[in-house]
Each structure stands twice: as structure tokens, then as C-alpha cells.
Amino acid sequence: MKRIFVRLAVAVLLVATVFSVAPKASADSEVFIEIYNGEWVFGDCSTGDYIFFDYNFYVPAGYTVREAIEITSPEIGVVTDSAEYVMSNTISGSDWWYVPVPANGSGKYFMSVVAPNGVVLSSTSAEASCVTGQIFLPYGDVYGINEPAASARVMGTVLADTPVYAEANPTTALAPVLKAGQTWFIVGEVTGTDGAQWYKVFVGGKNTGYVPASTMTPQGPVPGAK
């Protein structure tokens, strides 16, 4: 377990060397880490498995990367490990990693970026369970940053695949797509340029996205809804 995690830390440091770039504007709004393309390595949890995932990142020099891994099962209980390291160079690029999942339990991986003043600017995670056979990537395939406060959000379930829109306007579709069955935070409700209701949705991006209200169902009162 310890060896697996240390190898991960080394891999990220190697990526720092491969993807070192001249520092650009170090505005905190540009910092991100995203995880996507989660999949099982073997597809058979009878004796345990691994989840494989890709990630993209932009971390300025002097910022800290924090990582943690948690493996849980009735046989081993809860085993955790964590590490953090300050980037000596600005890094920007992509890589991949994997997390072990025991036969009767789950595996979780967390990563965050912390500014020199101690503020967590971006965070994301990957989780899989051999009990349910499911992989959970909370931030989907878009950027992961701090989630909104509990008082400013409500969980919503996606009813049908829908693009994320830059505005409550059908002509502003972006590349990321929310998939039916996923859950995301709804942080507001507005009337779109088409006269229909739209939800403001936190999708882990640097900016809040919008989706037609017809594509999601909130699991409670929508913040700011009239």
C-alpha cells in the first residue's frame, strides 16, 4: 500500500519535469486538476481489481499538491496514506494513474491544489466499489474546484444527457456533457433566453455552467428559486 502511493508521488514529480513550462499568469482562477475516463482494469472484482483514470492539471510553481488514498474492506479495515509536495516548477499537462480496490470493499483517491496562502483552489477524486461494481468520478470530465457551501446548493439528478452551457442560452453549448443518472450540485435557477427555466449547475468548472431545467430534477429546494 505504501509503495503504491509513493510511486504515485514520484510519478507526479516526473510529470512536473516532463511538462515544465514557463510560468504564465499565476492567477488562482487558472489552477485546476481534473480526473476523467475512469474504468476497471480487469473488470472482475472476485479477487479485487484496480480502477484506471486519466487526469489533467495546471499547478503553478510554489503551489502545493496534496494526495490521499483510502482502501476499505472488512478484511483489512480502513488503510490510508497521504502526501503533499510543493511544485518547484509550474506544471501543465496530463497523465494517468490507478487505485486498488479490494474484493469486498472500495478504493478512493483524492487530489487537491493549495495556494501559498493555504487556500485550497482545486480538488477532485475517484472512487470505486467492488461491492456495487460502480466507479464514481464526482467531477466528471470537467475541471474540479472547491464545491459551493451546503447552504448554496442542492443535489440534482441528470434525467437526460445534456451539454453544459456557458449561459442560459441554447446557442452557448460547451464541450462537457452531463450524463443521464449522474448527480451534480444545482446552485440556482434562472429564465433563459428561450423563455424556459434553466439551472445553474456546479460542474467543478472555473465558471458555473447552465443546463435546461427539463434535463435535471433537484432533490430539494433550489437555492434562490422563486
Image: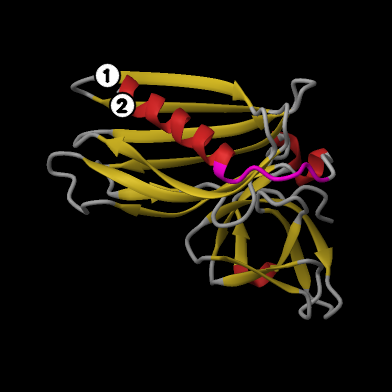
Q: Are marks 2 and 1 in contact (CB under 8 Å)?
A: yes
Residue placed furthest toward the left: 46
Residue 40: horizontal and vertical position, in percent?
29, 52
Crowding at mark 2 (Cα within 10 Å: few <14, some 14-19, many 20+): some
**Disc 2: which residue:** 72
Residue at screen point 35% across, 54% down: 39
Please state which of residues 109 and 170 is positioned toward the viewer in this rendering.
109
Looking at the picture, which amino acid does disc 1 mark? Answer: Gly
Residue 55: horizontal and vertical position, in percent?
52, 49
Secondary structure of the residue carrying tag 2 is strand
Residue at screen point 45% across, 42% down: 126
**Disc 1: which residue:** 77
Residue 221: horizontal and vertical position, in percent?
70, 49
Q: In the rendered image, which quarter is residue 73 located in?
A: top left
Question: What's drawn in magenta, residue-wise?
Answer: 18-24
Residue 175: horizontal and vertical position, in percent?
64, 70
Secondary structure of the residue carrying tag 1 is strand
Left or right of 190, for residue 129: left
